[in-house]
Amino acid sequence: MSQTKVQSVVESVTGVTIGYMVAIFSQIAVFPIFGIQVSITDNFAIAAYFTVISLIRSYVVRRWFNGR
């Protein structure tokens, strides 16, 4: 059974939201190891940028697989 478009969006948003939180904590832990110092605001912005890209990618891949 394939997913509806709405189900695909819900799944993508859920996965990406979890990924966003992982990204924030990862950046806070990893950036200092590489000497990268950014404010918490910048950390949120960087994670948000990649989250939008991830959301689009996740949705497109899901729809592509459901269309096959």
Image: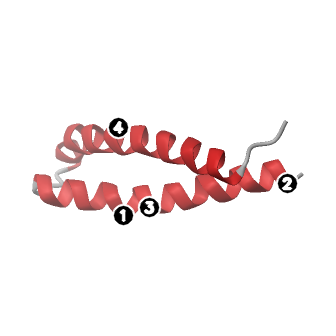
Question: Mark 4 and mark 3 in contact (Cβ < 8 Å)?
Answer: no
**Which mark is in front, 2 or 1?**
2
Of callouts 2 and 3, the N-terminal one: 3
Please give the name of the residue rendered at 49% of the width and 47% of the height, measured from the top-left corner. Answer: 13
Residue type (three-letter) at the residue carrying disc 4: Val
Q: CA distance from mark 4 to mark 2?
A: 30 Å
Please give the name of the residue rendered at 85% of the width and 54% of the height, measured from the top-left corner. Answer: 67
Is 8 located above or below residue 1 in the figure?
Answer: below
The residue that mark 2 highlights is: 67
Q: Which mark is residue 49?
A: 1
Taking depth in this image into account, of 1 and 16 the one nearest to the observer is 1
Of callouts 4 and 1, the N-terminal one: 4
Q: Which mark is residue 5?
A: none
Left/right placement of residue 42 relative to residue 26 reads: left
Q: Which mark is residue 22?
A: 4
Left/right placement of residue 3 relative to residue 38 reads: right
Question: Mark 3 and mark 1 in contact (Cβ < 8 Å)?
Answer: yes
Q: Residue 2, image x and y in percent? A: 81, 42
Of callouts 2 and 1, the N-terminal one: 1
Q: CA distance from mark 2 to mark 1?
A: 28 Å
Residue type (three-letter) at the residue carrying disc 2: Gly
Of callouts 4 and 2, the N-terminal one: 4
Can you see residue 38? Answer: no
The residue that mark 3 highlights is: 52
Residue type (three-letter) at the residue carrying disc 3: Val
Taking depth in this image into account, of 31 and 7 the one nearest to the observer is 7
Left/right placement of residue 7 relative to residue 51 reads: right
For mark 1, give the secondary structure: helix
